[in-house]
Structure formats: structure tokens, C-alpha cells
Amino acid sequence: MEVHIDAVASISERLHQFYVQRQPFRVYHGSTNSTRTADKNRDNTVDTSKLNHVLEIDSLGKTALVEPNVPMDKLLEATVVNGLVPLVVMEFPGITVGGGFSGSAGESSSCRHGPFDSTINWIEIVLPNGEIARASKTEKPDLFWGAASAFGTVGVVTLLEVQLRDAKSFVELTHYPTNSFSKACKKIQDEVANSEVEFVDAIAFSSKSVIICFGRLVDDLPAGSKPRRYLRRQDPWFYLDVQKRATKSKQPVIDYVPLVDYLFRWDRGGFWVARYAYKYFFTPFNRITRYALDNYMHARVMYHALHKSRLSDTYIIQDVGVPYEAVDEFHRWVDQTIGIYPIWLCPIRVRRDAPDSAHGLHADFADPNASEFMLNFGIWGPGPSNYEELVRLNRAIEQKVHELGGKKTLYAQAYYTEEEFWHTYNQPAYDAVRAKYHASHLPSVYDKVKVDEDAKKKTIEGSRMPAALRNVRPFQGLYGVYKAWRGGDYLLQTKKTPTAASEASK
């Protein structure tokens, strides 16, 4: 704990220095699952990358004391050996605890427990003036909820207490095929209403083929059953296995999936986004090529390659939630306007039950008259080659979601104007927290998530890829793969002085 205290003291001193000058700063975590371009250098950045330890597992109280840069796989390693598991585990092993709280995150257990931030008991946070504070749902609840989904614009979260529950060996997972979107939505709601079901999500392969996947924890396999695995090189990708075995079945298909395999079932292939890479690189997509290229098909490597290649700028990457009553209309619109499949569907209980929780960006989630649940649509795929058309489609998605009373998850690029953004999110509640806790001089959430053309330009100019090969298929992608293979630090860049820049150009 002494190492943690010293690290936090150093962050506090750094923030105080910035505060005296009223200088905005960026936070360097050491990793990211965002698809946004960011402008970071050592002169404007607070380095928290060493806050990456699980400090304590309380088996009796069923909690974990965790620093913010602990990824999901490391957290699971620490909890499962104690017979425990977090209430919500984000789908990719590299997503961090701090990212799940300060960003926005939900998974198939969010139908029971809400977004990841709802499963945090309390946080330690360094405020922009350097003050170290503790906030929970009962102690400084405005700061707690204000920091949730604030993307570091209220302060730097340095410690979190995560709620845990008893773990079991397997997830009994039922794949239920439906032939229409309306039937699928009803089945999702029915399973959410079933108290015995602990996990619910779905895959829409088309408007007439939607598989609902719902499950519960179990300790034992039925006689004659074998575990269904998804994490080894020789295992099938989860979505392909579901598509092959469930789409043509007239009966539900039941599997018994080892707990960790289930929680990270989407890692290999990054849901299904990695499939597009095979097409991009003119590579056959089959069991042999997936086996051979498995090291590159995990989310950590994929995000690294996406950042360095900038191919994420050419994709539609949207996670949006709409109330149940708007699901059919939104799906029809997406089907006719975007036409991207598969689509991930995940019900999330967004309502906050804790008293005094109407604070921050999502203060409206505390309204008892608002929708209790939203159905998240994960819409991910190549966009049109014309950039203006790509922007138009992304803006159309944002506008349609707002029209239907929904919300967008902000890990991806946001194309809103500032006025549109604050019509969707609660600016008065968010600004009140920032003003009270000395954060008004920092960039806002909108500043952080909006499409930043200047940052894109700097990233391009700072690339070592020959200019003649940029934006040329497949060289742009090969550059990203090379950087992913090489590894190393791809987020924090040394700011070049004019002399250094001129020397580099010689």
C-alpha cells in the first residue's frame, strides 16, 4: 500500500502544478480500448500507468481493492482463485477497471447489475487542484456519480473497490434462435424478467435471424456433456460457433462454457470485427487462416493495429442504447439505412437505485420515471470510402438515437455538434460537479470525445509510414500490424522540439 500512496502523492503534486497554471492535462494509462485519436505528449500528460495492481481481495466482504489500470484478465486471475468474480466483467481482457468506471461499459450481466460503474462501492480520486478525496454512493455521491463516465474530466481516479460475487465453474448457456427482430426483443425481455437467468445478450445475423444467448452459473457438467471452449488457438470464434450451430436449429442449443471462456468469449476476433481484416488483406477466411493468425486476432493487438494504421477512422463504430419501446423502430432504421450485420444486442439496466445519484453526465438515469432498461446495439463495420458520407452516417445514427430517447456509449468517436451533445447528456448536472470540485478549467467530456481533426493530422504527420503508402490498401493496415507485432508504447509520444524535428527529417 505504501507504493500506492507514494504514486498517488506524485500524481497529486503533478495535478497541483497544472492547477496553479490552470493548464489542462491528459492522463496516460498505458493502454486503451477507445477508437478515438488522442493528442498526448509528455508535457501535457499525467502518467498513471504504474497504478496497475490488485491490492486486496476481501473474501468475506466480497470486494476487490483495485488500482485503475488493472485489466479484466488480471482482475479475474486474482478473484477466481478466491472463488469470486466481479458482478460485471467487460468483454475484452485488456479493458481496465478505471476505463470501465470513467468511461462507459456494460456486458451481458448488466441486465442484472447495471453498467460497470454501478458495481463500484467507492473510489479514491485526485481532484484537479491536487486534493485527494474518497467518494462513494453515500459519501460525496455527487463526486462519485460525477466521475462515472466523465472520462477523467472531473479528476484522476486512483483506486476503486469493486463488488464481487461467488463464482462457479461453468456458464450454462442457451442459444435461442428467432426469425424476427420483434420476437427476439420479446425473448430478451422475457429472459431479463426471469430471475434465474444471470446473463443475456444476442447476435442479429440479419433481420430474420437473431440468436438470444442467456445463461446462468453452474458448478457441474451434466453427465455426457463436454465443456465448450473459446479461448484456445484451436477453438472456434464464439460468434461463428453460434452461427453454425444455432441459426439453423429448430430447438435451443445448450452449452456448458468454462467461466473465463464465457466472460472473454468475444476476445478472439473482437466480436467479429477481425473478419473484416481478412478481406482487407486479401486473405482467405477459414479455420486454417484463423488458426495461423490467432496471435493477431485478440482485442489487445487489434486495437493497437487500429490506432497505428488509422483504419478505425474508416469504420462505423457505434454502441448505442435505446429504450425497449423504441427497439423495433430503431432496428428498421438501421437495417434500411446502415445495413451492417452482425449486430450485438445487450440489455442494460441503466436506472440508478442509489439515493442522491442524479449527478454527472448521466444524471437522468436516476429518474424513476425514465426507462429502466435500454437495449444496446453494437454496430461495427466498414463505412463508405467517401469520408463525408461516413460522417453523415455516423451523425445520422447519433441523431436517430437522440430522437428515440437513447444514449450513445462514448468510447468511439462522436460526431455531434457541441449543442447536439448537450441536448443528449446532462450538462447542468455535469457542470455543477466540475465547478464544485475545481475541474471547470479542464476540457469537457465533449472536448475529449468529439472527432478531433487536429489530433488526426498530428498523428498522420508523426507517422513513420511513407506518405505515398498512407491510405493505400493494404499498406496502411500492414503498418498497423507491424506496429502491433513490434509492440511498445503507442500512446504516449515524446513532444519534438523544432531542433529534434528538423534533425529527424535529415
Image (cartoon, helix red, strand yellow):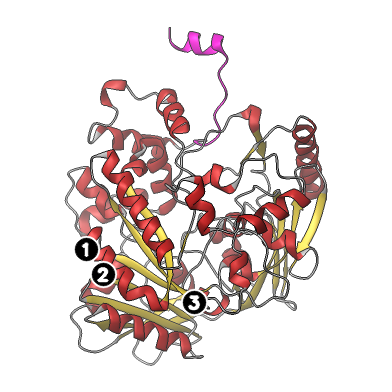
Depth check: 223 or 344 in front? 344
Residue bearing the label numbered 3: 373
Q: Amino acid at mark 1?
A: Gln
User: Circle 3: is it few (<14), some (14-19), or many (20+) Cα within 10 Å?
Assistant: many
Q: Alpha carbon of mark 1 to alpha carbon of mark 3: how far?
A: 25 Å
CB of mark 2 within 8 Å of CB of mark 1?
Answer: yes
Mark 1 packing: few (<14 Cα in 10 Å), some, or many (20+)? few
Residue 212 higher or lower than 317, as above or below: below
Q: Image point 52% across, 37% down: which residue?
A: 491
Please say whether residue 297 is visible from this viewpoint.
no
Please tell me whether mark 3 sits on a helix, a strand or a loop: strand
Q: Up-down: is 75 above or below 262?
A: above
Q: Amino acid at mark 2?
A: Arg
Residue beneath disc 2 = 332
Secondary structure beneath dot 2 equals helix
Give the residue pinned by disc 1.
Answer: 336
Q: Earlier in the sequence, mark 2 or mark 3?
A: 2
Q: Residue at x 46, y 79 (%)?
A: 199
- The reply to whether discs 2 and 3 touch (Cβ–Cβ < 8 Å) is no
